[in-house]
Amino acid sequence: MKNIKVIAEIGINHDGDVEKANNLIHSAIASGVDAVKFQYRNQDNAYEASSSKEIGDEILLAEIRKTHLSAEDILTLADECSNHRIEVGISFFSADDVHDFGNSIRKFDFFKVPSAELTNINLINLLMSFDKHVYISTGGHAENEIESVLGSLPKNGWTPLHCISNYPLALRNARLGYIKFLLRKWGRAVGYSSHDDHWESCLLAMQLGATVVERHITFDKSGEGLDHSSSSTPKEFAKITRFAFELDRLLAGDEPRAPNQGELLNRQNLGRSYFAASDLSEGSALSIGDLVYRSPNIGLNQTNISDYVGKALIQPVSQGDALVSSMFAKRDPLPSGVIDFARANRMALPVRLHDASAMQAKFPIGSFELHLSFSEVLSDIDPSGFDKNQRYSIHLPDYINSTQLMDPFSPDQSQVSESLAILEKTVLLATKLQDTTKNKVPIVGSFSVVHDTKEAFFEACSNLIEEYEARGITIMPQWLPPIAWYFGGSVSLQAMNNVRDAELLIQHDLPLCLDICHLIMGRNYFGFQAADLMTRLKPVVGHIHIADASGIDGEGLAFGGGDAENIELFARALDFDCLKVIEVWQGHLDQGAGFQTALVRLWELYGS
């Protein structure tokens, strides 16, 4: 979970324009920052005009006058921040200026003492008296001055910020190692106030231990004014906030190596295993000459094939079949009561077109979910081959082709057309299956790309679902993970995985497929309470996917392979009155070995 606070300082980059300041607030929010900060000078107290004869003084005085915003203006902007649930702070250069805000000073969530006022102990004490956090910049001061001031402060309520008072700051002058010195010397959280020529220095500051990063925000780094050149654009802030959010995970790994889920998937797709080169008869002893070694890696491979060469097959094997361990020894039968337990709890298993009949025969639990590829959907699927006595649901393909996700809301019209074509074909299959089985056949879809606002995204989802509901087909968006394994790598998903999404799902009364595995990973990523969210979502949940998970991207694990607290969530899921699809990763391989293990484990935990 993110533990680095990113502050976008609007400072004087609003150029004295309230509307521009307001736009900077909204751009900062869109970039993902935690807070914005202003600065205030009472013009009557700011500068002694009679002394503005030194080099640069007249420039500074003119800048102060040009960029002035009144206390009333800044308080209006503070209200705008509060309305959008983002923290707002302010810097002062004089204790007298604080009084311009009266009792409204408490609207601010934090204060900042700029480097030039480090030794202004009256200002520091006044700001700390409001019981709001105070950030104190150390720029331009010698160590004995810094030690004198910081050593006089109370234990709590303040954070020192490393700062070099150059505008802009060259890489060679950044002295980021001072962050480590501050951490050692003061034994408290330390931040970084950045005026760097390169925003990337903020990343190094975070890696060295800064838990607060403050940097000026601007729309134009080449704009007229003193601060624009040492500022960052909203796009650069989006990069800073992304690294701040991911830093702990980025630096993780100081432990024994374990492949992530995406690596396992790529290992399967790119790796090799042994397949029958020709038909093999039951009872024949396996010879390496009977086999070819090809992709994908879905069976015995070079790490274990030697254990089976010379062993007799207990079943015939067709040419092209992957060699698996169950072809050589009978698996223990399902314990008595497992099938009845699964039926009583309305459990289902995911099946593909090629293994649906075999899985239905092996696991007579009565309910199955068809997981189809985009090429299968676009082919002519004959629904007469499905058992009219079974219940079915259909999982919409995540992809519409080899490079694009399912996205009926895309600004790319060709992507919309392909997405809707696949959706329409899936709807036709669901309609035929409903006619065959006389039961509802819901369609589960992963809709995750937000092109405008979340509100607009959920409105589009609602319209799509209503359109097909009028035709008798229920489309259910799936609760998604924060990170999905798409196209051989991980992709951060923008919707259907956080608390705000739950609020919008309930607001629009959208039918939901609640994926418990994805919920667990979202809990670990965002920090919400999964059990509480399940309770809130229960009125709209019409379908469940269930598997174990760990961390932020370890999905589809066997039950018991994930975080210990997950056991309670599985029990809660079983209490929902809907189908629960067991989505253990690769559970269908080796003739359903993973599915059998999963059903038995759930029965042992909750049924036996």
Image (cartoon, grey):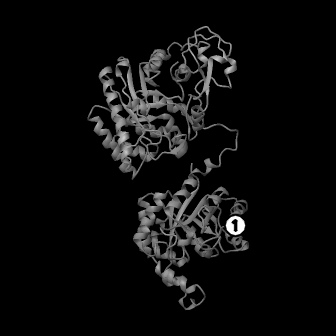
How many numbered marks does the figure carry?
1
Q: Is residue 237 visible?
A: yes
Q: Position of residue 339 (x, y in %)?
A: 47, 16
Q: Residue at x 26, y 35 (%)?
A: 470
Location of residue 78 (image quadrant) = bottom left
* Amino acid of disc 1: Arg
Q: Position of residue 503 (x, y in %)?
A: 40, 45
Q: Position of residue 529 (x, y in %)?
A: 50, 42
Which residue is more in the foreground, 532 or 231? Answer: 231
Which residue is more in the foreground, 175 or 154? Answer: 175
The residue singled out by tag 1 in the image is 175
Q: Is residue 223 above or below residue 199?
A: below
Q: Is 305 left or right of 376, judged from the image as shown?
A: right
Q: Is residue 511 visible?
A: no
Which residue is more in the foreground, 127 or 437? Answer: 437
Q: Position of residue 79 (x, y in %)?
A: 42, 64
Q: Is residue 59 above or below residue 11?
A: below
Q: Residue furthest top?
A: 283
State the SS at label 1.
Answer: loop
Q: Is residue 569 above or below residue 300?
A: below
Which residue is more in the foreground, 590 or 130? Answer: 590
Q: Residue at x 42, y 49 (%)?
A: 450
Q: Residues within 10 Å of mark 1 (few under 14, many from 20)?
A: few
